Amino acid sequence: METDRLLLRPARPSDVDELRALDADPEVMRFLGTDGASSVGLVGRAGYWIGIEKATGDFVGWFGLGEELGYRVRRDKWGLGYATEGAFAVLRKAFADGVERVTAQTMFVNTGSRRVMEKLGMRHVRTFHVDWDDPLPGSEHGEVEYELTSWPGTTGTAPPRVR
């Protein structure tokens, strides 16, 4: 898959170092904790793509749809719209392939990820609380779930073009 600025391709064994570095960044993992699923497990897994910045060839992060929409982006690429752009491509493919409902969850306090979900046209469906053995700071505010049940379902500005 391609967007205006990203090439999205399956994860390869040659991506392992970049995926490990992504997981090793404490800010990237801030709302996932040390128990967050390892990105290295995405190598060879269907439904997940590595985002490569077309202009530079830089690894940006990963985007995918397993049980729910997910993404992780390198911290130096935050604030550039890559999370929205990559996730949009995944959603477009999912709905084109016949998926009828996509969900995503994050911590209530993860405003950056919530903003991405809202830009994608996803709507907040619930806030819930989980009793964690080792709660992360902010977990007392709960988790949120968003969903998208139709395509196109975007709000606000037009989403990035995906080819």
Image: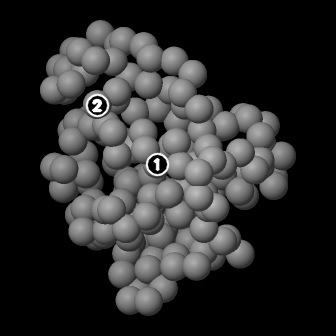
Picture residue at 57% right of the left edge, 22% below the top: 125
Q: Which comes sooner in the sequence, label 1 or label 2?
A: 2
**Circle 2 residues within 10 Å: few <14, some 14–19, many ≥20:** some
Residue 160 point in image, percent of width and height: 60, 68
- Would residue 129 appear left or right of 54 to someone viewing this image? left
Image quadrant in which you'd find residue 124: top right
Q: Secondary structure at mark 1?
A: helix
Q: Quadrant of the C terminus?
A: bottom right
Instruction: Name the foreground residue: 157 vs 59.
Output: 157
Instruction: Name the foreground residue: 90 vs 80.
Output: 80
Picture residue at 31% right of the left edge, 37% below the top: 110
Q: How is the image coloured?
A: one colour
Residue 126 point in image, percent of width and height: 51, 18
In this rendering, is residue 134 above or below 80? above
Name the amino acid type tagged 1: Val
Q: Which mark is residue 109?
A: 2
Q: Secondary structure at mark 2?
A: loop
For marks 1 and 2, give the CA distance: 13 Å
Q: Which mark is residue 116?
A: 1
- Would residue 55 appear left or right of 161 to someone viewing this image? left
Name the amino acid type tagged 2: Val
Residue 86 point in image, percent of width and height: 53, 62
